[in-house]
Image (cartoon, coloured by chain):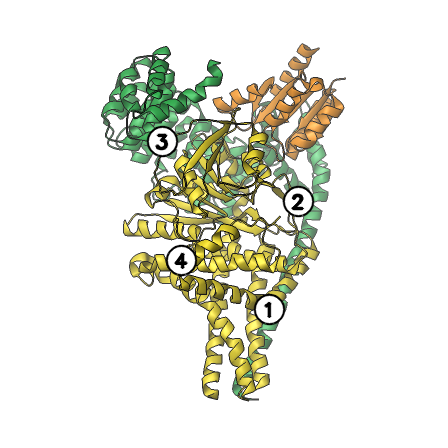
Chain colours: A yellow, B green, C orange
Amino acid sequence: MSSVITAFDWFVLGYFVLLNSGYLLLIGVASLDVARWMRRFSFAAHDDIFANPLTPGVSVLVAAYNEELSIVASVDALLGLKYPEFEVIVVEDGSTDATFERLRQAFDLRPVERVIPNEVPTLGRVLSTHAPASDIPLLVVRKENTGRRSDPINVGINAARQPLMCVVDADSLLEQEALLRVVKPFIDDPRVVATGGVIRAANGSRVERGRVTQAVMPRRWIERVQVLEYLRSFLLGRTGWSRLGALLIISGAFGVFRRDVVVEVGGMNLYTVGEDAELVASIHAHLRRAKRNYRVAFVAEPVCWTEVPHSAAVLGRQRRRWSQGLGEVLWLHRRMMFNPRYGRIGLIALPYYLLFELIGPIVELSGIPIVIVGYALGYVDVPFAVLFAAVAFGYGLFVSLSALAVEEFSFHRYSRWRDLGAAVLAAVVENIGYRQLHSWWRLQGLWRFIRGQEASWGVMTRAGFDSPQ
Amino acid sequence: MTRVASGFVAALVAITALLVLLALATAVRKAMRESRDRRHARVEAAVRPALLSYLAEDEPDPHELDEVVQGRAAGRSLQELAAGLLTKLRGEDRRVLERLLDAQGVLDQARRRTRRPGPVGRARAADLLGAAGYEAALPELTRLLRDRDPDVRAAAARALGKLAVPSAVPALLGSLDARRAVPAGVVTMAILHIGPEAAAPLADGLSLDHSGTARAISAELLGRLGGFQAAGRLIEALGSDPEERVRAAAARALGRIGVPRSVPPLEAALMQDASASVKQAAAWALGELGGTRGFAGLTAALRSPDHALARRAADALVSCGPLGVALLQRTAATDEPGSPEARETLGRLEPAAA
Amino acid sequence: MARILVVDDDADIRDMLSFKLAKAGYEVHTEEDGETGLAAARELQPDLILLDWMMPRLTGPEVCRQLRDEEATARVPVILLTAKAQEADVQRGFATGADDYIAKPFSPRELMSRVQALLARSG
């Protein structure tokens, strides 16, 4: 029995080492990219993109459900983006509050005729379309609610008329040059079909008129840990994946796609909670099968900030949903798994997400009861167990601190020493307790995925649109 | 202690050491950056007012600033400020700054730098030479267009644009498809900077011995630069170029240039071209040209199952005058194809009509 | 002693114009974003406003529109400065009530002439 436990312990340790080493690899690759970007920033020529009349236009799509408190500020901020040619399309998804009324008053909306062809499938009916009396490039589409986020986005896709489309969350806070930065890869390389931008946690930072003016670490530990998490996984994880040519997930909070390609794959999947990841996976699957030469890029510069949950209850719901969504996406595209025909997506990215992100929580959490049982039965050598835990913890801490170091060496958005200190402590806290809690939520999400589809819709109606206010 | 346990201890010690090192490196880096920023701000605070009041004078003498600019830090600060300002200005003030940089030897230095290793330095040098409008550096910049590093090539292309020398256009067009290519967005902006004098070499870019990308971009830019003389060649491209993006770009260009004899070929393209995007471009162009000559083609296009085409046809019909508006009103009242688009276009007209 | 308000988020441009205008004998005030610029315009009642287009918080055209809506500032000459120079943008600029429109990169000396002309006309 003791040898079984020992073998299992070694397995868990090996898993931790592999997971963290994988992350370190991603961070290493990403930091090369970031370093390269830093040195060349002064001549990145975003001003030329702004002044060029041939720069492709962007349709900014926002799904809005019960966002009366912040919708006007959000749309105002979007309309103030620095970009030569764009339209903002707000799809008001049958809100039960005053979302539409606020918009109507703020922008003097009038009902207008707007042809919305059925290029990608949608479920809810479009009720009416509205635009301001002045020449502000805003369109508000009202539709009936069907309880999922992908439906309003698909309506937006149908209504969009520019060659590029940008999907943002209603509560995303974009930097003024965000569009210039995430469109640049399209201009530099005609093979690019989609780009993702970095999402950072805005909690605690100074926000004025829908823009983050100074990055500040928040006070609550639960929020601090998420700031660090986002740095690690968005800034570095995704940059790393992109450099490896295997970027699988572009966050629904901010992503830019070529509209024609999105229409080819049928828009967003209406039946999954992980609709944003599913869109990218579909694009990969479709273009690889068609043997087209394409790229999915990622922009490391900070472009988008979002309020992250500040209570464990809301955070838990979000993480369960993410995990469930991941399971659904991997299942929908299981054909690509381990399939050499799909290149690095099939051979590296998908297996990684399956083994470390989806199934990972099982491994991470099973260690604890096994150790307790073993100790009760007298099979566990306490000093050994402590060392074991210390090494696992230390390695995890090292990965988190590396992410912090890269951020400090490159974008250094957190200017106060106090913030840096808070971030270091948050890295410690993250590896004691938060990680395990997170694994538990992910396990629950995995369970829901396994149990089947009905549960997912029930969760989505409310959890999908929790306003952190 | 067992071997395994001592292995763990070793690992723990190693990790702890690395952690401490990492924390130290981060802290040191932050402290160094802050002190460097403070120093930089101090130097700039002295140099900036001197440069700006220098610029405010009518006939400034470059050597006036020599006193202020003592030492390398001040010199570099002055150059950065001057170069930064240069990119935002035109006219005599810009020439004042150019002469200043020249007197400081900065521009010659930049020319030499374009020949040395280190792509970041080469790219920065190219940027500076372009911003300063240093025409003497034309040969170096043309050579940098074939540099191994993509950022250097892009910087060279931008610089060539800022020098506004039409003879650079063929090289710029050529860099679109070279093995060491320059992104299209950079090339188009550079050619736009060169201005209307680029029209003649762009017309050559329409010939079939250039790539499809070069031809499409030439057409697009001819439209933006008002290349009247190239209208004939654009009409030819509209009718017979093998690639649809070139034909579409030619249609758009003809719409912008506004030469009346392009209406029949545009109408022909609208009715007969195989590609949806070309038809859409032709419809738009007919709208830009105005007048009733394209009426028949637009009427047919309004009923097209392609919504994007119908929409453009509806918008274009407005510029056909009362005839077009009347057709739209008749169509809008029905349920036929084209009626939603007609209603949308008429809806936009209303405030103006009222 | 005419009073001029310069509103631009670019410090180089703000300072350079400040120096030049002051040298030419004008009284110059500067602001770095649309919101503070609007507030300064109301408070100072300048004789001319130089307004950048792309600014954080409140863009140039929005400031111009609000200025025109208010009795006190409805007739102040406004010159818009911007990197956007397409025909549609020029039209929009004038539609919001600007008196003149200068594309960046610009010639400061040319700008000075326009400033003088506008001030002479508005008396």
Q: Secondary structure at mark 4?
A: helix
Residue position marked by numbered label 2 in the rendering: B72
Quarter containing the C terminus of chain C: top right
Q: Amino acid at mark 2?
A: Arg
Task: Bin the neighbour count of mark 3 within 10 Å (Cα to Cα): few under 14, some 14-19, many 20 and up.
Answer: many
> Which callout, 4 or 2, points to the residue nearer the camera?
4
- Residue drawn 57% across the image and 56% down it: A314
Q: Is residue A225 above or below residue A113?
A: below
| Tags 3 and 2 both on a single chain | yes
Residue position marked by numbered label 1 in the rendering: A433
Q: Amino acid at mark 1?
A: Gly
**Residue A282's mark?**
none
**Residue B217's mark?**
3
B314 or B330: nearer the viewer? B330
- Asked whether, in this view, residue C45 is left or right of residue A228, the answer is right
B145 or A107: nearer the viewer? A107
Q: Amino acid at mark 4?
A: Gln
C-alpha gap between disc 1 and disc 3 = 58 Å
Q: Point out residue A65 in the picture as x, y percentages from the top left corner.
A: 52, 43
| Tags 4 and 1 both on a single chain | yes
C-alpha gap between disc 4 and disc 2 = 68 Å
